Amino acid sequence: MMSMSRVGARAALAVRDTVGRSAGKADRAQAPAQQQAMARAGRAPAESARAKAPLARRAAEERRRRAAQEESLRTVMFLSMWGPNA
């Protein structure tokens, strides 16, 4: 029989691995958009300002998503160590 701390640790590892994989996918998906924005920046200054706005929003959303996932991981770790069945 596994103890609750092992179950919680495994759950935390699963969340951490999921976060790592999804962050890698997001970085690869964002690379082409950044290349296109850089190409547009060389054409016209007004065009580059318009191209940067969606990238900034996307980057801010990515930071919020990662922060939420990190908070979820912290919650799982806390409950696995100090929860009602610890």
Image: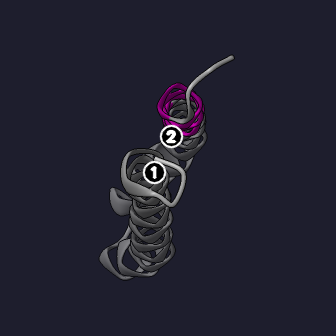
Q: Is residue 52 above or below residue 75?
A: below
Which residue is located at x 47 percent, y 71 percent?
51
Q: Is residue 74 above or below residue 23?
A: below
Number of numbered discs? 2
Q: Nearer the viewer, residue 45 or 28?
A: 28
Q: Residue furthest top?
A: 1
Q: Nearer the viewer, mark 1 or mark 2?
A: 1
SS at circle 1: helix
Mark 2 surroundings within 10 Å by alpha-carbon count, few (fewer than 14), some (14 through 19), many (20 or more): some
Q: Nearer the viewer, residue 9 or 52?
A: 9
Indicate left or right for 1 with 8 as reference: right
Q: Mark 1 vs mark 2: which is more N-terminal?
A: 2
Q: Residue furthest right?
A: 1
Residue type highlighted by circle 2: Ala
Q: Main secondary structure of the magenta part?
A: helix
The image position of residue 78, as x and y in percent, is 38, 54
Q: Quadrant of the N terminus?
A: top right
Which residue is located at x 35 percent, y 61 percent?
41
Point out which mark residue 27 bears: none
The image position of residue 43, as x and y in percent, is 39, 61
Residue type highlighted by circle 1: Leu
The image position of residue 10, as x and y in percent, is 56, 27
Point out which mark residue 73 bears: 1
Which residue is located at x 51 percent, y 32 percent?
24
Q: Which residues are magenta?
A: 5-16
The structure's colour scheme is one colour
Q: Nearer the viewer, residue 38 or 3?
A: 3
Point out which mark residue 23 bears: 2
Indicate left or right for 67 with 33 as reference: left
Q: Is residue 77 above or below residue 6?
A: below
The image position of residue 56, as x and y in percent, is 39, 73
